[in-house]
Image: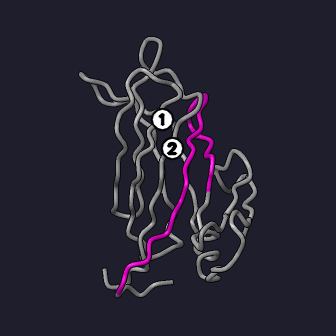
Amino acid sequence: MENLLGLLKIHVQRGVDLAVRDVVSSDPYVIIKMGKQKLKTKVVKKNLNPEWNDDLTLSISDPHTPIHLHVYDKDRFSLDDKMGDAEFDIGPFVEAIKMRLEGLPNDTIVTRVQPSRKNCLAEESHIVCKDGKVSQNMVLRLRNVESGEVELQLHWIDIPGSRGL
């Protein structure tokens, strides 16, 4: 990973109003993919509004590579059922980090990303500076499914010796 810029910590907070894939509920988990990297949250049993609170960390070499999120229902004796997917772009988040915003008052909104046909945002997403660190909260509306949203928070981790931003 000679072109490593840093690490992206994705806090997969929770799912909201996910689809039923078992008889009356689902056992959902999330898979995050970027390029050849693939990460998975824990499974939350029998819950359509799961609280994962899992931190998944991706190595970032190209901030223009889209990140894919897939929600599945864990099944014991058959293939896991799809419960929707979403995609998000970290371009605006990376641009905010490049600004080197130390010294701003806490909870300053640096950038607002609007939902559009080109993204999976369910609502306006804020890139915020707090304690000299930039984070982004986002609510993604799942595609290819009857209902469901996933709430995430993005954090950047600089790596000593990496190319950096």
Does residue 155 show up magenta in the picture? Answer: yes
In what element is the residue under mark 1?
strand
Residue 69: percent from left, percent from top = 48, 49
Q: Amino acid at mark 1?
A: Glu
Mark 2 to mark 1 CA distance (whole Å): 6 Å
Residue at image mark 2: 13
Q: Amino acid at mark 2?
A: Gln
Q: Nearer the viewer, residue 147 or 6?
A: 6
In the displayed structure image, the side of residue 139 where residue 72 appears, left or right: left
Q: Which residues are magenta?
A: 137-160
Mark 1 Cα-neighbour bin, 10 Å: few <14, some 14–19, many ≥20? some
Q: List the residue tagged with mark 1.
A: 51
x 51%, y 25%: residue: 48
What's the coloring here? one colour
Residue at position x 59%, y 38% from top? 149
Q: Nearer the viewer, residue 94 or 159?
A: 159
Kindly indicate whether the residue at mark 1 contacts the one at mark 2 (C-beta within 8 angstroms): yes
Look at the image and say whether residue 88 sits in the magenta stretch. Answer: no
